[in-house]
Image (cartoon, rainbow, N blue to C red):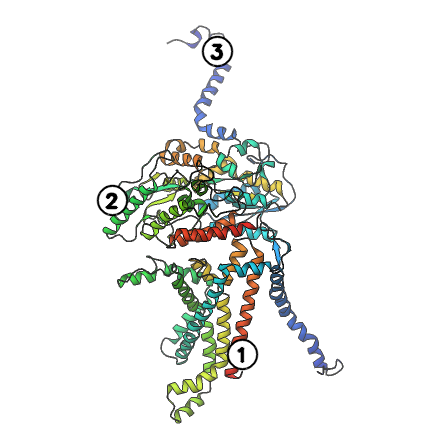
Amino acid sequence: MTKSSDLPGLKSSLSRRTVLRGIAATAGVLAMPAILPSRAFAATPGSNPGKYKIDLGGYTGPELTNAPITLKIMRQEFPPEVNAVMQAQYDAFSAAYPNITIQEERVPYGDLPTKVQVYVTSGSAPDIMMGRNDFASAYAAGQLTLPLQQFLSADFIEDVYAPLRESATIDGNLVCLPWETNPVYMAFNRDIYDKLKITPPPEVGEFDGGWTVEQYMQNFDDVTKALRASGDTQTFALAASGYGNGGPGSNYTQLESIWVRMMGDPKAAKDSSVYNTFMGVSEDGFTASGYVNTPEAAAGLANYQTVFKSGYTPTGVVPDQFRGGAAAVTFSGTGTVKRFLKTGQPFNFGMSPAPKGTIAYTTTVADSPTIYSGTPYPAETAALLAFICNDANRFAFHDAWGSMPVRKTLVDALPEYASDQRLVLGTNVADNAFGPPKSVGWFDYFSAINPAVKDIALGTDPQTRLNDVATQIDGLLAKYK
Amino acid sequence: MKFPSWTGNPTRRGELVIGPLMILPAALGLCIFQFWPLGVAILNSFRAFNPFNHRPNGWVGFGNYQAVLADPSFQSSFWVSLIYMVLMIVIIIPSALGLAILLDKRMPGTALARGAILGALASSEAVAALIWNAIYQPNSGLLDVIFQTFGLPSQPFLTDGHLAVVCIVIMTAWKDIGLPMLIFLGALQAIPPHLFEAASMDGANRWNKFWRITLPLLRPSLVLGLFMTTIAAARLFTPIQILTAGGPNGQTSNIAYFSYAQAFLFNSPGPAAASVVMMLLMLVAITIIQARALRSRSGI
């Protein structure tokens, strides 16, 4: 056995101190996998430890006041386990800044836009209100929210996925901060398909590698016939919408517009009907006629109508239909995957891209907190928002809720987004999804078209109803000129 | 008119001071919560608004009224409002009267029936609407399950415009029938029994006693019930919002829902205020017509 002191070149340098250093270095290398995540997070734009009393993430504003103040937050209701995560974050913030009290108001998700309107009208709105990136134009035009780039580092903002960041940025101002996204694609119940001996949608990683809308319709038909033939009248081929307040016409921005805008094409000639179908509204954002009621749009909603008329999906609201095992397919996203993986999947499931029309189209909509322009405490409000959005807090939130992070460094730090086809597809969809049509009157547009879509789902002629709603939207948008 | 003198009876003098003080809270409440908002609504109906923050930014004269009157949705809502009123009166008043007569007979189960009817009356309108929403659901709702049990086809309770109007009225009648029933019951129990005994001695049958004694003596209560039902029908909102959100095709939207949509969904406070004022005018007109018609017949 050779002694270390016998090795050439080592004799003179191998002191006790060197050995201790070597042991420490080895221990450090061995311990690296354990500490790597936290080090990696500390290096990201969403983590900024040491600069303030606590890690305020991307916040770059002044130190917070010592005066006793109250910050109000309005957000959507989450399940108890997610609410607990949020509460823990408020508690941590208040522990570091005992002079700052946080009051929270929770409202049903579908009521958020109206609630924001009511609060803004009152002139006394919560400091942080949960908004959406599809309303960014209105936030900017009405100066309802504070531009956030004055409080947040450029690196932090750049870290947000480009389609989401751009949809939340108006004239260079970040008017809301995307904080989670659920790119829309399809989840299917493999057990139902196996039982019926029908081929399920393809499990691919590419956002445009899925079935066409015709293939999906044929599949829905096959599944429905097989289910009914087996005497099962309670299970459906396609689950009732769980977006917005549920059911048909639930959330045009996030769901039903897929049926319409997939029939358009952003690369077509600008004066073509196909191009207008994709755009949904004129370039100045004030005209819907000729955009939302094109023949292609009507054809898209005729497909949508068929899923109701043919009994592929229920005509009413059915909460948790897919999760309850009572539907073969649902429009869903990474949230479903993460929740199923975390809580234990109730059945074997797979994920596939959304139906394709002229193009592979899906939506990217992000819940996006805003800071009310009338807040008396802009810096403190921004700091609280940044704290909630720091790396550790976002990981805790996404772990509990299952939605996909909107910042690239967060997604990169989660290995499952690179290895699990169901999530890889989600990231590809997020990268290639489209924002809603840009109009300062998008809230009016959204409020008018949801009931129209519901009417069409329930049997009204698509072209006639789209013509009516286009005229209605034109009238509603006129006041914004 | 001769006013009492301050130097007169000390008791009267005290009443003159305490009396107005006693009604002051109620008068203030009325002014703050009824007349002031009404005044603001009337003013707003002549104003233009910033659609983003809903703050007034000018005057438009009758522009909001012109816009609302030209809107096919408003025209439809106007007629739907009238349909709600007619249907609710036709369903609630006779049903409430019938229930009151049955409960007045103190048959077995009367206490249970009374409790059930009053329980519905006491329940939240939103909760009642949610319960009925579940009952009306296609495929899984209670009514559809009953239909399926008897081999009948599924019914589009809330998705067919005409049927949805009837469904909303039935739900509202179920919820609100208790109050007119209580009024009628109280009036029935106040009719002196000797009138019926005398009529029996004169050989009157049940129908004659009802037509000649009960109904005429119930007329003041019927008038009250009619007014209350009319106003309740005009104010109908929660069941519409929860059951149909005004659809399908706006066929269940009344003026109250139209006003809500203008204000909170379409960022149009001016037209919303104009439609509210027009609803108020419509209610005043209907109430005057009802009062005159009933006064001429009943002499009250």
Both marks 2 and 3 on one chain = yes
Q: Which mark is residue A228?
A: none
Q: Earlier in the sequence, mark 2 or mark 3?
A: 3
- What residue did someone put label 2 on? A195
Check disc 3 and give the amino acid type: Leu
Residue farthest along the bottom direction in this orientation? B202
Provide the secondary structure element on which disc 1 rests. Answer: helix
Mark 3 surroundings: few (<14), some (14-19) or many (≥20) residues within 10 A: few
Depth check: A462 or A270 in front?
Answer: A270
Q: Quadrant of residue A362?
A: top left
Check disc 1 and give the amino acid type: Arg
Q: Nearer the viewer, mark 3 or mark 1?
A: 1
Mark 1 surroundings: few (<14), some (14-19) or many (≥20) residues within 10 A: some
Please report the residue visible at 39 percent of the width from the left and 8 percent of the height from the top.
A2
Specify the subunit that label 2 lies on.
A
Check disc 2 and give the amino acid type: Lys
